Amino acid sequence: LFSTVPTAPPDAILGLNTQHRSDTFTKKVNLGVGAYRTAEGEPYVLPVVRRVEQALAKDPSTTHEYLPQDGLKHFCDLSAKLILGADSPAFTNDRTVTVQALSGTGALRVGFTFVARFLSEETAVYIPKPSWSNHKNVVVQSGLPPTKEYRYFDYGTGAVDLEGMIEDLRAAPAGSVVLLHGCAHNPTGADPTKDQWEHILQVVQEGKLVPFFDNAYQGFASGSLEEDAWSVRRFVKAGIDMLVGQSYAKNMGLYGERVGALTVISSEGGNGEAIRSQLKAIIRAMYSNPPKHGAMVAASILGDGDMFAEWEGELRKMADRIRDMREKLRAALIKNGTPGNWDHIVKQIGMFSFTGLTAAQVEFMKNKYHIYMTSNGRISMAGLTNYTVEYVADAMKDAVVS
Ligand code: LMR
């Protein structure tokens, strides 16, 4: 029965981890997956996370009972406040439903399944071009037609192609879902300015489009949790139907714990129980209920003023180290005389730099220097250290001039 199953292609991002792991070259560098690394290149457990975990382990009231399908209520309430703001208009008139999700991907997966069931049959999902490579997969696996793309990035200026984006969104049929990266666009590191967000909102409202915000980097773009939630809050203020996904993988370093949330906001309100019941039914058939540990850790931090402040400090430090690596990579490329202008590396924000390297140059660097990055030329800046930055810059030079 199973002998004819074909091999699926490796994942564009996670497949690089497998390749990097089996590479025995001592100077190998993994700039593929977006995961924070310390100045020594090691995975990082935030001290505040470690302390909460130790306290939970010692607490005799900690159990391993099932959570309800929609997860830990306390965690969901705090997550909604984190992204929407405590005094958000979304918290009035039964307009907001938040459920725990398996990190950002899980929030998208449950959210798009909900979209597939309850939005018009012709629903088209528009994602930016380029976008995180998994968006397309999640949409199709959720039972929706293949995604359509809207222009997003101007390769000439390295900024958002607002005109192209507006033109494409204007052409989208009413009721279409538009995926937007709340901040720190992955992979380009180019976000709309506040004025540009206003323009996008106007087109979304006029076209009766439904925004689905993917927020995997709150706190990583500007270093401020508040600032990075600006776009979502602005759209909420407009009082439209929308969905919001959240992840604590990057900002709390809880990658493997799969901690996230999905919030559905309806413009009219009054139908929260029905929406929640449908989300719970979707979750029940998918994985019954979400895991508890990571959500308890996140909720402990979100709900305690001192720990929250410590977390914000840690976030700023992580964002600063990434910014420092941007400066150092650009400086090394200038110092070694790599042809081209590398200013975009310091202008882009978030975890990634969209270097402009071609797929052939990426392949060259992998084969000759054992440096791993996605084929679109994206590098995870957090994967760089003071020890590897020159090696990477020299490899980039070789790739560019070869
Ligand atoms: C990335 O873009 O590298 C991260 O979001 C990790 C992932 O799951 O792809």
Image (cartoon, helix red, strand yellow):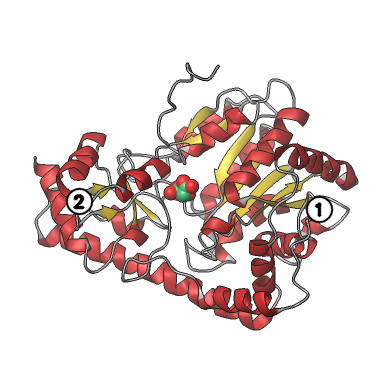
Mark 1 burial class by Cα count in 10 Å: few <14, some 14-19, many 20+: some
Residue 88 appears in the rendering: yes
Q: Disc 1 vs disc 2: which is toward the camera?
A: 1
Q: How many marks?
A: 2
Q: Amino acid at mark 1?
A: Pro
Of 267 and 9, nearer the camera is 9
Q: What residue do we see at 50% from left, 60% from top?
A: 250
Residue at image position (44%, 69%) is: 44
> Quarter of the image holding residue 321?
bottom left
Q: Is residue 371 above or below residue 115?
A: below
Q: What element does badge 2 sit on?
A: loop
61 vs 371, nearest the viewer: 61
* Distance (Cα) linking label 1 and label 2: 53 Å
Q: Residue at x 78, y 30 (%)?
A: 118
Q: Residues within 10 Å of mark 2 (few under 14, many from 20)?
A: few
Q: Which residue is mark 1?
A: 68
Residue 341 shows which numbered tag?
Answer: 2
- Measured along the vertical axis of the image, is residue 5 above or below residue 203? above
The quadrant of the rendering that contains the C terminus is top left
Residue 190 screen position, x and y as percent? 42, 50
Query: What amino acid is found at the position of numbered circle 2 in the picture?
Result: Asn
